[in-house]
Amino acid sequence: MIDVKTKLVGLLGYPLGHSLSPLMQNKAFKLTGLNCLYLPIEAENKDYSELLSGMKKMNFIGFNVTIPGKIDIIQHLDAIHPLAEKIGSVNTVQIENGRMTGYNTDGEGFVSSLTSETRCVISESSFMVLGAGGACRAIAMTLAEREAKKIVIANRTFIKAKALCDEINGCIRDCCIPLALSTEVLAQYMPYINVLINTTNIGLFPNVDNTPIDHKLLRKDLLVADIIYNPIRTRMLIEAEEIGCVTLSGIGMFVNQGVEAFKIWTGIDPPVREMREIVEQFLLNKQ
Ligand code: NAP
């Protein structure tokens, strides 16, 4: 029941019609019996100052930020977690005593999905990440912090991969190699990696027949992950399964970034299985 004691958690971004976070977080609040409400607030960047001072005066304990505000929000915060500062974007904010602290739970969400759903040990693995956008930044920075052996970043726009690798090699550890996203170039590096991660938009609904990598480059002992979760199984994952690879869908990352955010706001562990079930059910019904 909503009353004067109800704590609020927002989702800031634009547009928000597609977001599954309200469904997932409100389910978690309900199951944990917390008097909290997760509220989507469609807002473009220019609205942030007024919006945030309003939130500080209300019962907000925090919020998520999504496109287009993940970078611009930083200037409004009182503090930022060191990893979020390195990543250069924030997706989760905690409000405590009128102070706003920013975090980025995307990389952690991916890593906890990877380590809980597969037998992958980060420090014993070499990664190839396709793409060099916002999600790749969070994942590659987190993998570098977790002592990944090697991270090869292959992107359509090579200079973006190069800039990201230079940054990670400089501010975390010297472990990244930039590549162009072409079959010939990838073929040379595939023998040296054991985990492949797609962070590009290739294969995302409605372009479900597209794949970022020629299936002939895959081999049975590769772990193949896609951070896309619509569709749940992308063409890349279906082809990898046919070859016999262990695969990981983007649902786990989505759920776990929400789990980490929930812990930041409330200090308690949410019901991960039920959060995943409600997201999976929604996507399956849609498909
Ligand atoms: P972004 O910052 O816009 O980056 C997109 C990346 O994809 C860039 O590296 C871009 O290459 C590449 N790309 C896009 N279209 C391409 C094409 N036709 N051919 C080759 N490369 C292409 O986006 P993002 O925020 O990183 O998100 C990327 C994907 O991850 C989206 O599909 C999103 O749904 C998914 N995602 C999932 C989660 C989760 O929780 N599971 C979280 C965040 C994002 P260029 O640099 O050359 O443009």
Image: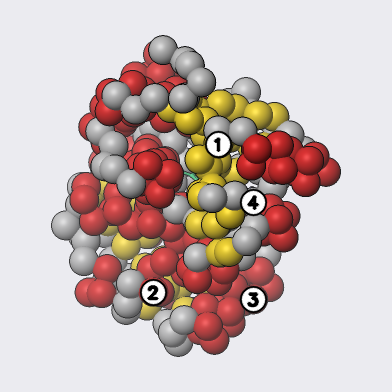
Real-space Cα distance between discs 3 and 2? 18 Å
Which of the two labelled residues, at mark 2 and mark 1, occupies the earlier sequence position? 1
In front: mark 3 or mark 4?
A: 4
Residue behind mark 3: 163
Above or below 38: residue 190: below
**Label 2: element kind:** helix
On the question of residue 133 being in view, the answer is no
- From the image, which quarter does the C terminus lie in? top left
Q: How many marks?
A: 4
Q: Does the closest atom of ligand 1 sit within 8 Å of the Cβ of label 1?
A: no
Looking at the picture, how far across and down is residue 82, in whole percent? 50, 71
- Disc with the residue nearer the chain's start (3 vs 1): 1
Furthest residue toward left: 119
Secondary structure beneath dot 4 equals loop
Q: Give x and y (percent) for residue 242.
A: 26, 41
Kindly identify which residue carries mark 4.
70
Taking the image as shown, residue 9 lies to the left or right of residue 217, namely right
- Please name the residue that numbered disc 1 is placed on: 60
